[in-house]
Image: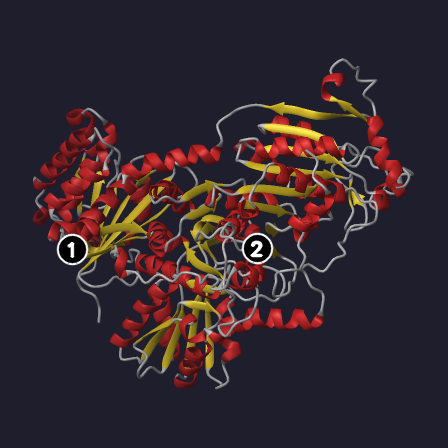
Amino acid sequence: MKNNSRYEIRFSGSGGQGIITAAVILADAVGTLDGKYVSQTQSYGPEARGGKSKAEVVISNEVIDYPKAMSIDLLLAMTQASCDAYFFEIKPDGLLVVDSSLVEQVPTSRAVAIPFTEIARKEIGRELVANMVALGAVGYLSGQVNLKNLERRLLTRVPKGTENMNRDALQAGIREAKKVDLKSLPRSFVNEWESEV
Amino acid sequence: MVVDAETIRQEYLRHDKKFPHVWCPGCGNGIVLGSLLRAIHNLQLPKDDVVVASGIGCSSRMTTYIDFNTLHTTHGRALTFATGVKLAKPQLRVIAVMGDGDATAIGGNHFIHAARRNINITAIIVNNSTYGMTGGQYSPTTPYGSKSTTSTYGHVEHAFSIAELAVTAGAAFVARGTVYHAAHLDTLLEQAISKRGFSVVEVISNCHVQHGRRNKLGDAVKMIASYQERAVPVKKAQSMTEKEMEGKFTIGVLCDVEKPISTEEYDRIRQESCHMV
Amino acid sequence: MAADNSKKRLLLQGNEAIVYGALAAGCRFFAGYPITPATEISELLSVKLPQAGGTFIQMEDEIASMGAVIGASLAGVKAMTATSGPGFSLIQENLGYACITEVPCVIVNVMRGGPSTGLPTNVAQGDVLMARWGTHGDHPIIVLAVSSVSDCFSITVRAFNLSEKYRVPVIVLSDEIVAHTRECFTLPNVDEVRVVDRIGPNVPPEWYKPYAANNRGVPDMAAFGDGYRHHVTGLVHDERGFPTQQPHEIEPFLMRLHEKITKGFPEIMLSKSYLMADAEICVFAYGCVARSALMAVKNARAQGIKAGLLQLITLFPVPRKEIDAALRQCRVAIVPELNMGQMSREINRINQSGTRIVKYNRIDGQMIAPDEITKQIISVS
């Protein structure tokens, strides 16, 4: 009775980076347009800016009983602190995606490092949309969402007047992620650790 | 226009309620009740459209006896219930009757916020300087130095001036009257009820049984008669010194201003927002 | 049309689904005070209620909110408030007023860690017994627990319906997890939602007795301003609504308040059973914990253990019949809760069959994970 289609994504970073917004857009696209079961949760502290921020999206073809992540398929880390805190919760064949503009020490070679913040600043002109660059990459790398639907939901959820900027950010993220050759990565964290021993 | 007492009794008191009422002989509450009924009568408000809410205490028992939509609520909360009634059915005329402890101690926060909100309700606060129903403990309007069952050595705190508090909190209409000046009180209540916005009438009243007795203020007649000397019309008080006003208080209209009424403002929001669906 | 279907299918937080449920049930008045983790309910209703011709007001505290809700309901408008632990403490005073005056209203309590300010952003289930017994005096009340976004919609509708039908306050217990979890929900059309309204008087005003017993045990309710002038008081009152101290009037009145709920037991007591047909080990759970429990039971089944789940939706009145049947059927019962064992105490009370009851409690602000419950099931199997 194990649910094999269950896929868990955790978005992490610091408050103000738009972590929750990115997770909500992904969940919205998967749930309302792709037609899969989805649950999106987050944990938060009292502060609106700064502090650790964490949001999760669980995707499944079946009804989701437990709404939070248990063993992560894909971890997005937008800060070093969040990378260090959550890296060990990724399942052995899961994937780590980091913002290489902010995460200097990547704890594994089974990781995709893309400078989301730098891309946002240089290509879009606003660091603020680094979350949408990351969302594009996560959407592509997870293979869990129809990318057209992801863009549709992004456009309905971002503030009016910022649609183009956010769409460009999303597409930049997708484009960067397409350059990554996942097959060239070690297949599992476990193998990697074992080979080190 | 003076209406006879029999008409008021027949028309506005509940005949199916087992009298007698709970008030002591000589209590000012009866005078306030009479004034309120005459004011409503003179304004020709249909009884079905009038809601009177009250809190807990002697004066708050008033709602039991009068033939309107009546709401005897919890201690201090009359204005919160009244706010709900008024917002849900803005066409109703909502009046709240409270005591001094009710409105300014346990209900003090509700009182200042109702004034700030400027919701279209009339608040009548019968101020007898004590908690009469529970046996004469000190209230927020018990004068400094007075004796009560909880200040047997003399009260060490200072009293609120309720009407002035209401002005500061933002009420659109504020007046003070006394149970001695009954005809004047009729007029003040009429003005308050017909005022559009939050209106407050503080009525100085006697509790000779609990407050008067412990402070040697005499019987009901003596206490009520003392208001004749202690009450100073607002206009006259303006030319009096602080020393001359010692032991006295102002009566009349303290404040009467026009400002947007939250009930009506909200109605505009309803109209505008339904186009945004 | 496909486009129309996708339009109605929404990604909603539990708090937002409560708003849609309330609106579908006919709620047109809300008074509240900001508090984490219930604030989203106020925020969304402040947008939606005026659009529906209703009223939203932010009061000066939760005492005032509850007062305004009762006032609005007396004026004939379905009304609700939503809060969390500290605010739930403040509403208790006027909640008792709603019980004794039989004023329909719905109170949502999104539970967070306590006592006192506690853990404002963390989950807990510490207010269960308070929901039942928080206001003073013997009083009737209905308490329902939600565990998903779709529950938040349907149970809120149910709460209004029961409240209107039985003239009793209904408490919806949510929690921080359910409140903030987003899931997809397809909003039903207006005509797909069964809505119950209070029954008004069918006699002329001069014959109307606002608290007269009838065969339903629920007096007909007139609204202020409808020509049925009457008195409403928090004092014990006679059938005309006037205060009484006569023993022969007091007891029948207070008994009726309880009996009207007893009469409705079959439709008030709600529970859902999963994999219970041949279960030997039963998990009793409610709220967000029911989600973990269901997964745990499925995991246990995958390992060949005959486990089942009885999810309690109505917490009070306690669904005694269903609990009793499950206890008689099973060898062991496990009661996981995010408190020190508030419902397990009730389940123990019902246990006449000597079934072993195992508590599993967590009070660290974290959710109970499925594996924790699976371990408990395995250890007793």
Measured from the top left, where is residue B94 in percent x and y? Answer: 56, 42
User: Which residue bears the numbered disc 1?
Assistant: A35
Left or right, C360 with reference to A12 = right
User: Does residue A4 appear in this view?
Assistant: yes
Binning the other alpha carbons within 10 Å of mark 1 as few (below 14), some (14 to 19) or many (20 upward) gives some
Left or right, C20 with reference to B37 = left
For residue A102, which numbered disc appears in the image?
A: none
Q: CA distance from mark 2 to mark 1?
A: 43 Å
Left or right, B113 with reference to C362 = right
For residue C92, which numbered disc appears in the image?
A: 2
Q: Secondary structure at mark 1?
A: loop
Q: Chain of mark 2?
A: C
Residue drawn at (17%, 25%) of the image:
A122
Is mark 2 in CB contact (under 8 Å) with mark 1? no
Q: What kind of residue is marked 2?
A: Gln
Q: Chain of mark 1?
A: A
Residue C85 in the image: above or below residue C44: below
Q: What kind of residue is marked 1?
A: Gly
Measured from the top left, where is residue C63 in percent x and y? Answer: 56, 47
